[in-house]
Image: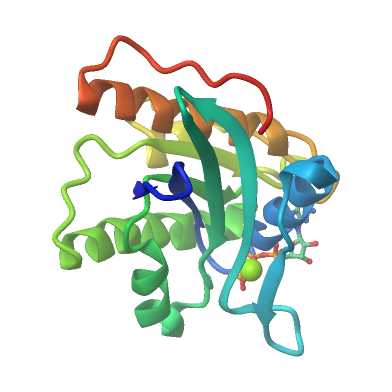
Amino acid sequence: MRVHRRSQTLIFKIVYYGPGLSGKTTNLVRLHESVPDHARGKMIQLDTETERTLFFDYFPLSLGRLGSYKVRIHFFTVPGQSFYNVTRRTVLQGADGVVFVADSAPRREHANLLALRNMYDNFEALGRDTGDLPLVFQWNKRDLPDAMPLPLMERLLNPEGLPSVAASASTGEGVQLTQAYIVRAVMEQIRRATGGPGVELTGQS
Ligand SMILES: Nc1nc2c(ncn2[C@@H]2O[C@H](COP(=O)(O)OP(=O)(O)OP(=O)(O)O)[C@@H](O)[C@H]2O)c(=O)[nH]1
Ligand SMILES: [Mg+2]
């Protein structure tokens, strides 16, 4: 979280992580579309000519107020392709929460696991303790006819039973719920960390 005292703004960073082509960029595009104009900033997509993320995607969202402070959330995606790890680590720096977008295609079972391990490795390299990391799993591409069974994905990737959402980002299904879960997890984490009486977000700013 970054605090801008002069403009009385709190800025949270949420990163969408996951293997290549799992649908991270699609999530952000759908999310951006679903936010009213007055609450969203421009979406930036830095990708290759084949629409693979090269650096990241990004857009800012105004969420409301926390006491006298305005709350903004900066959403990012990482590039999933394995050789962009330095970029992934850079994007992950300072993340207040992560959405792990897993691909339900059976042939991506191993890629999902590798990407999750890679996320923890990168946090470790950044010196970040992930014990209290707000993390939400999204089981994406549920529309695939051969999608892996949800209990299998939960068992492989989410043995701790963290919040999870079944989604089809290409149609937008589950995209907003995923965002709602991660925002809630981040806000709860702030409340725990500050020991405050509770933070209520009030309206759109
Ligand atoms: N069937 C299906 N396809 C999807 C879904 N979500 C995304 N896709 C497709 O999967 C492909 C990759 O989506 P992206 O959002 O670019 O994936 P990404 O995770 O950002 O990929 P990288 O940036 O390379 O890591 C695109 O062709 C999407 O249309 C889904 O829910 N179902
Ligand atoms: Mg992408």
Q: Quadrant of residue 48?
A: bottom right
As drawn, 41 above or below 81: above
Locate residue 103, reporting x and y percent: 60, 52
Q: Can the viewer see residue 149 in this picture?
A: no
Q: How many marks?
A: 0
Residue at image coords 34%, 71%? 89
Q: Can the viewer see residue 42 in this picture?
A: yes
Most foreground residue, 56 or 194: 194
* Name of the residue lying farthest toward the top: 197
As drawn, 111 above or below 162: below
* Name of the residue lying farthest toward the front: 6
Horizontally, residue 69 falls left or right of residue 178, namely left
Residue at image coords 83%, 46%? 37
Residue at image coords 32%, 29%? 190
Most foreground residue, 162 or 5: 5
Residue at image coords 72%, 47%? 141
* Quadrant location, the C terminus: top right
Locate residue 101, reporting x and y percent: 55, 50
> Which colour style is shown?
rainbow
As drawn, 46 above or below 74: below
- Ligand 2 positioned in quadrant: bottom right
Locate residue 56, reporting x and y percent: 56, 72
Most foreground residue, 4 or 63: 4
Locate residue 81, reporting x and y percent: 52, 77
Most foreground residue, 20 or 130: 130
Horizontally, residue 82 falls left or right of residue 108, namely left
Horizontally, residue 97 falls left or right of residue 59, namely left
